[in-house]
Image: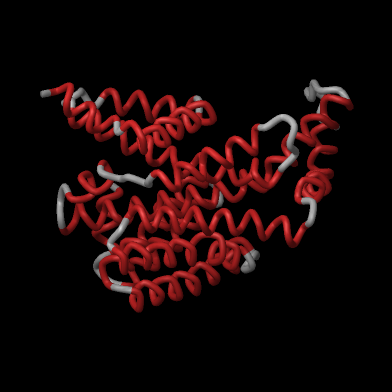
Amino acid sequence: MLDGLARFSMQGRWQAAMVIAAMSLMALAIPPVNYIASGIIALSTLRAGPKEGITVVAIATVVFAIAATFLLKQPYITGLFLVSSWLPVFGVTLVIGYTRSLVMSLLVTAGMGLLLVGGAYIVLSDPAAWWSQMMGPFVEMLQAQPDWQLDQAETASFVATLSSMMTGLIVAGLFINVVLGLLLGRAWQAGLFNPGSFADEFQQLQLGKLSATVMVIVAFMALLPSVDLAIMQDCLLVLLVLFSVQGVAVVHAIVRLQQKHKSWLIVMYSLLLIMMPQMVFLLALVGVLEQWFNFRRSSVEQGE
């Protein structure tokens, strides 16, 4: 089905724009569907160039705005998708298009995420307090529910914890959308026009010791009990997602190099859905350690 959507989108800019708009509308009810829309933007840009890519985004914006106006009476949602999803995916796709480097595009995306976290602290001064205020009405609604089991103190503690993480969680969510859209678009491009090339490219992904060192430093500062650096905790969430992608690449490579059954990958992705926080941390740890221990090379040596 997904390959069919990709092929249909490659028939012309209007077809691509219609798929993007349709998938984005569906994403309002099923958020992960938005990854498909992002993937089509990446595919169109990679295949036909930046001019065609931005044209597709512009047409999709108009189509989505018309649909959102008549179906939902909320045309402003178009701007939300454009700023948070479509334009970032288009911009990062330009990076891989010009540099031919998946690593560079991922690092640029992570850099954008870190800048966004920093910008939130500049604009809001205290993002945790801002999120706490924004969640106030929602929390009051939850407390009014008869099956709400937390008392006043427990609820306040829950809100404080969630508020302190919201900036990092939101930015990490945007980062995931851009990265998955980029990877999906690149995989479609390879599958349609150069089968097998994406698997090799992804499995050879190497983010480098410098970025891994930055990750370790940020993690140390974020987790240090004697230091209250909320901005580092938010930055850590973005970097965890970045290196979890590296970890996934390592697992894919080892399964292929050691000729393991694909059920190993099914288990990994199933656990990622069921135990996402723990698996993201574990995969990120693998991704960081890979920069020094090179598990993929070790797996080749063991297989010889």
* Number of marks in picture: 0
Q: Quadrant of residue 271?
A: top left
Coordinates of residue 166 in the picture (x, y in percent):
68, 44
Q: Is residue 30 among the parts visible in the rendering?
A: no
Determine whether 131 is above or below 70 in the image: above
275 in relation to 81, above or below: above
- Residue drawn 42% across the image and 62% down it: 92
What is the image's colouring? secondary structure
User: Of 228 and 90, which appears nearest the observer?
Assistant: 228
Task: Give the image location of residue 251, x and y in percent.
Answer: 31, 31
Q: Residue at x 33, y 54 (%)?
A: 102
Vertical arrangement, residue 65 with respect to residue 277, above or below = below
Q: Quadrant of the C terminus?
A: top left
Residue at (38%, 30%) from the top-left corner? 269
Q: Residue furthest right?
A: 152
Q: Nearer the viewer, residue 281 or 182?
A: 281
Determine whether, in the image, residue 173 is placed left or right of residue 50: right
Q: Identify which residue, 144 or 172, lies in the foreground.
A: 172
Residue 96 visible (yes or no)? yes
In the foreground, 111 or 148: 111
Q: Is residue 31 left or right of residue 106?
A: right
Residue positioned most to the left: 304
Question: Which residue is located at x 67 percent, y 60 percent?
Answer: 119
| Percent coordinates x, y for residue 262 in the rendering | 23, 27
* Residue 6 percent across, percent down from the top left: 28, 57
